[in-house]
Image: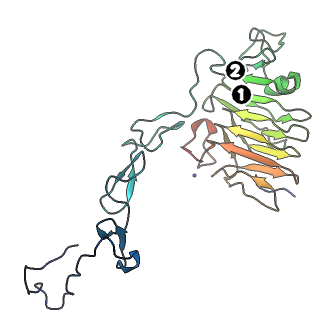
Amino acid sequence: MWAWVRFAACGLVGITSCSSPDSAPKKPARDAGDDAGSCAPGEAAADSGCRPAGVPDGSCGAGFVSDENGGCTATLPADACKKGELAVPGETTCHEVAPCGTGTWGLVPVETTTEFVDTAYVGGNSDGTQAKPWTTIQAGVDAAKPGAIVAVAAGSYLEDVEVAGRAVRLWGLSPTKVEIVGTGVGIAALFVRAGASGTEVRDIAMRGAAGGMALSGSTDVLTACGYTTRAASASTSRTTSGRRASRTEGATTLVAGSAAASSIDRAIATRSSSDSPLAAQRAVG
């Protein structure tokens, strides 16, 4: 079974009354040693007696400031971040979700087994090297050794990618610059099948008519700094029938298989199905 895997007080000294005869008399201050249970509703025990409930001024967590009403407000940029950027509480400027670095593959780790992919390459005779990269992600996956990195350069890759039989690490230049767009023929833009436990997908956007990413028969699959959306409509992945699927707001992740498990780290999702994942609107998780 498949499940689709963001006071005022008044008074005078002495025996007197408030201006209003119906006002309740002012309560005497409580000693610090009074039991916490003696505080009135809306109050909390403090070293000096009782105080108004809420977070005391100056006690908000890092990245937050007091709202002078018992609460805390996040410190964030005055204006909303641009698409593909974010700011966390405490930051007053926006920054890119996943910095690209320089060069065709930016900050993607280069190992002896890394397979390189670049849809813009037109030299022919691709062999997976930086000089002659594959032009499709599937070609890079097919050529990759177990656990190898498949480095993906900027571009929109129109294909249905399948990973099966061995784990690979798909690693894009940036989720704002790399996307896999499903053709609609496959079950999703990226399908991680049996035998691919431990597969990783980093800094890549995924979208398609059926779904952005599907997972069946593999465990410990990680997606980090990426987008997953369904073109037709947005939905939220959820836990069903004992299967564990990480939640990504506004995203579509299809999960099947009793042992299926997916984890999402700093997942990004688009709010509108008409938006390309390359124009993500906010960070979740």
The part of the image, by quadrant, that contains residue 159 is top right
Query: Residue sitting at 39 percent across and 52 percent down?
Result: 60
Does dot 2 land on a helix, a strand or a loop?
Answer: loop
Q: Give, as a three-letter code, the residue at label 2.
A: Pro
Q: Give, as a three-letter code, the residue at label 1.
A: Trp
Q: Is residue 47 above or below residue 234?
A: below
Q: Position of residue 149 (x, y in %)?
A: 77, 24
Q: How many marks?
A: 2
Residue 123, label in figure:
none
Q: Is residue 102 left or right of residue 2?
A: left
Answer whether residue 210 is visible to the viewer in this image: no
Task: Residue at the far bottom: name it.
Answer: 22
Q: Is residue 1 left or right of residue 69?
A: right
| Camera-nearest residue between 212 and 273 | 212
Answer whether residue 59 is visible to the viewer in this image: yes
Q: Position of residue 85 (x, y in %)?
A: 51, 36
The part of the image, by quadrant, that contains residue 184 is top right
Mark 2, residue position: 109
Q: Is residue 183 above or below residue 44?
A: above
| Camera-nearest residue between 281 and 39 | 39
Query: Residue sitting at 72 percent across and 17 percent down?
Result: 110
Mark 1, residue position: 171
